[in-house]
Amino acid sequence: MQSTADAVLVIVLAVNLLVLSSSRLRTIIYTVAAQGVILSLLPGLLHGGLGVRELVVSVGALVLKGVAIPRMLLRALADLPIRREIEPIVGFRASLLLGLIATVGSIYVSTRLPLLEVEGGSGQMFVAASFSTVLTGFLLLTTRMKAITQVLGYLVLENGIYIFGVLLLRATPFLVEVGVLLDLFVAIFVMGIIINHISREFTSISTEHLSALKD
Amino acid sequence: MTLTPVVVGAGLLAASGLISLLAPRAGRLGDLVFAALMVAGGLVGSVAAAAALVRGGDADLVVEWLLPWGRIWLHVDALSAVFLLPVFVVPALGAVYAVAYWSSGHNRSARPLRAFYGLLAGAMAFVVLAKDGVFFLVAWEVMALSAFFAVAAEDGKPEVRRAAWVYLVATHVGTLALIAMFALVRRASGRFDLAPLEVAGLSGSLATGIFLLALVGFGVKAGVMPLHVWLPGAHANAPSHVSAVLSGVMLKMGVYGLVRVGWMLPEITAWWGWLLLSLGAGSAVLGIALAIGQHDYKRLLAYSSIENIGVITLGLGAALLGRAAGDPVLTGLALAGVFLHVWNHALFKSLLFLVAGSVLHATGTRRMESLGGLAHTMPWTAALACVGCAAIGAMPPLNGFVSEWLIYRGLLSRAGGAGLGGAGLGGAVGGFNGGFAAAVVVLALTGALAVVAFARLFGTVFLGSGRSEAAPRAHEAPAAMLAPGLVLGAACVAIGLMPLAAVRLLGRAVALAGGGASADALGSGLLAPLSAIGALSAIVLGGAAGATLVLRWWGGAARGARPGTWDCGYARPSSRMQYGESSLAQTAIGLLVWVLAPRRRATPISGAFPRTASLRTRVPDPVLDRAILPAVRRATRLVMSLRRLQRGKVQVYMLYILLVVLVLLLLV
Amino acid sequence: MIDLTLHFLVLLLMPPLLLGVIIKTKAFFGGRVGAPVLQPYFDLLKLLRKQMVLSRTTSWMFLAGPVVTLVATLAASLLLPLGERAAPVRFAGDFVLFAYLLALGRFFTVAAALDTGSAFEGMGAAREITFSCLSEPAVFLGLLALARITGSLELSGLLGPKVVDGWIAAAPTMVMLVVGLFVVALAENCRIPFDDPNTHLELTMIHEVMVLDHSGPALGIIEYGAAVKLFLFGAVVVRLAAPVSTGNPLLDWGAFVLAMVLFAALVGVVESGMARLRLTYVPNLLIGAGALTGLGFVLLLMR
């Protein structure tokens, strides 16, 4: 845990728990945005320096994860008649506990994998942070009802994949990473459209109402 | 070292109740004879058991008998001596208590209860002494059955009958597992006794089978969490001195069995240890959390027994892990903690059940909600309760802390590490250490929850002012009911102040159950902190007592008028407005809703002048009330639907016969 | 010998000073001059000279409560190293005794509160014992993490010179421990944002509401005991945040006292900058603190 990259990842882990434990939509959006900004630092810290490729990924992450998407969500929050507090299916304390368990689990798994050391950071830490962030994303997706928290869940999930991608930045084609970002962008658009539609049809945006569509 | 005094003691216990039946039905003679015989048996037996612990040396006694497989084979070693001590001490004290609490003059059931109580005590002694498998099972069954009749003393009450039946079913499930276990033991060794097994005849799956069957069989008796279903009801509904024996001693027979089987098995697989450790951790946290949810103080004590058994099981798991890993430090510390906690729980839980009996005797209610302020009317009982509550909460000047500290210390020897300055972290696998660390945290959580449970018990029953008519009319318990409590309380303080001496006594038993190396490990300075703990405990006890007296004297000048409690300017406070036990529990239960799932029924308050409102909360048992009873109900419904077949008409039955014959024909 | 004397002097005399510093800091942020820093000492002396009023519902427990709490807290303080200097009593596993001595104090404080038979004090008692169920695991997780870092099992080692290793080799864990334990320190000592020691609105409080009926010397003992407890938690946090070791005993003592004053000032800053939390959020914050120390511990497993 000597390197700056590891320290950054530790912050990401802490932010995951923060996301799970906060109850206000606005706070969560800001927290996820902060996570994006923090993540945009990663490419530069790894692989021994900042190349063009790293720069592009880094700036892309900063703009998309840190600024653009959070702003969209904030605008959606302002425009739509959404209650500012979220009512989770699983309580905050329980989801915090689950998050902690997920973190412990992913760290345990990462110690069991045969991983190579990357220059400027330990692969172990990357894998742990990646798993735990993905799991946090899943937790958000499964335990929160509002459509907007679903978007946030996807975002956190993608952050986890992004961490993994950064680790493999040199090994895999650059296109993979861009592809992931693009995927996400599309997902956000889709979600945005869905939110719009749901809010038009049902006036409140909770996915619970979608179950009325089953028949 | 001969077995004679121990056997004489056990025989006296077993016979005492039967002999007292010879006394005339009326009058106190029977009670007194019974108590005298029990005390005599207890004294002889406990002195002999203590001698066996101090001086060591095994002894055998074999009597050829006509039982199918042969003989009565009794054996005493350090391990049995550890468990014999509570068997001889607690029931004798309970018998003295019963002279005033359950006397022949007042209770129709006193005479039979004496007989079963004595039999129960004697049978427990023989369970610990038995070496032969069949004799062990016979003693075990006598113990189980006499406990059933002792629990059912007040068989006029439906809830008592229900509790007794649940107990009977549960204990026989356990016995069944034990019989199967002995069958496997015979397969491994060719013999039918409780002797160490050879590695040669023992395949891995056979050993696992023996261990798991022992875990079920003895776990039911000990009350380990999913197998505890009988425990709360039986302990709450038995007469209090019986509850004291059940909780303080009989549960330990299950622990004894687990230790004994662990000692029999030559090699330990690590996952058995982890299994015991996690079962223990679950029992500890859930047991104490459920205790917080109870409204009946005897049920609360019963659930806290599950917690203490959980702590013991956790320690036992750690000891097995120590043996599996060849770590004498862990084994020694954990075993010492387990044995001492067996003693300690026997002391403070019996004390608390006797105190509970006194409160029940004085007020006639088991509901904490209707009590309060008993410290004024029952000062001695209140002081004893305070000692018991502090001890069971593992607070330092008393004995409970010492045994928990030993278990903590054992776990910590693996949960810590070599430090970052050294080469890595002790070299062990991450998860391995993490498990021990989790156990430490679970123990810490249990400790904090125990403070909630017992501060609430003590606070609502003894402090504040009475919440009903019963409380102010209470009276102090008679001397015969106080004296046993005083003995138990004094023992709690003594072990707290002289922990090193107590643990030294256990050295031989640790050596036997954990191997000589573990006892040596204990000798090598690991226990030195105990003298520091004892000294600090003495300072706390002395300092607190002295300073309280000084403060009383200092504030003595103010002892003129005593106003009422300041109630925020409220004009007419009533004692019903005190914070009650359920409100005290509510905050804590709120945090554990997802485990406890309390049920709550409230009538809504509406209008400007609401008439009546009520609030009922109940924390159901997660296994009995949520799993077993619904399953039984469903099974009953299924079976009942078969009754439609029973029409009562001969023609229909003939039709059935015809159908069966046809089906048979078709099959052939 | 000199060391031991200094240990006792600092331990016995300094705690009320922390309260004074906190009050002064809050006054500064409030734009007031504020009471003198030594005011808590004067308050204690005043209380000791006053008469006690005892409610007629109370029993011996009402007086035993404050006394046992203070004695237990002082006994616990014998186990804690102050700054760089080791504790007078130390042995492997002493932190368990430390935690349980504080639990003894809690039990008696709560019992004394319930002894008054007042609904308000019962409320405070319920909160106190419940919240401690959350802070206890957090503290143990933190101490376990320290045990892994320092390789020691005694408080004097856990908070000893090897804490520096932690900052060198596992800085993120250390940050989490400091923050987590600071939060626990605020909660256990009933400071803002958990509890407001200044208000006397019974419904909102934890600690103060439990001692509403105590007066005179008994109240003085309670206040002093609370100050000692704050001092103990502060000493832990300070030692973790600033493991200073100069080699000169006197300088070390000076550094410790200075750091403690800074700790008190920090508490004052937090109290000035924050409002008291809604009571239902208190458990969440404490669980968060536990999650932090737990995460810190888990991170150590990765090595």
Image (spheres, grey):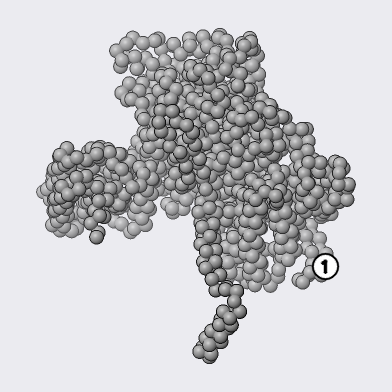
* Residue designated by label 1: B64
- Taking depth in this image into account, of B206 and C31 the one nearest to the observer is C31
In this orientation, does residue B583 appear? yes
Seen in the picture, residue A111 relative to A5 is either above or below; the reply is below
Q: Position of residue B445 (x, y in %)?
A: 50, 41
Q: Residue at x 77, y 48 (%)?
A: B109
- For disc 1, the neighbor class at 10 Å (few under 14, some 14 to 19, many from 20) is few
In this orientation, does residue C245 appear? no
On screen, residue B615 versus residue A145, left or right, reads: right
Q: Chain of mark 1?
A: B
Q: Position of residue B287 (x, y in %)?
A: 55, 46
Q: Position of residue C214 (x, y in %)?
A: 54, 18
On screen, residue A81 versus residue C41, left or right, reads: left
Q: Residue at x 33, y 21 (%)?
A: C272
Q: Position of residue A40 (x, y in %)?
A: 19, 44
Seen in the picture, residue A118 relative to A66 is either above or below; the reply is below
Q: Amino acid at mark 1?
A: Glu
Seen in the picture, residue B172 relative to B470 is either above or below; the reply is below
Residue C103 placement: quadrant: top right
- Taking depth in this image into account, of A145 and C80 the one nearest to the observer is A145
- Taking depth in this image into account, of C208 and C176 the one nearest to the observer is C208
Q: Residue at x 77, y 32 (%)?
A: B478
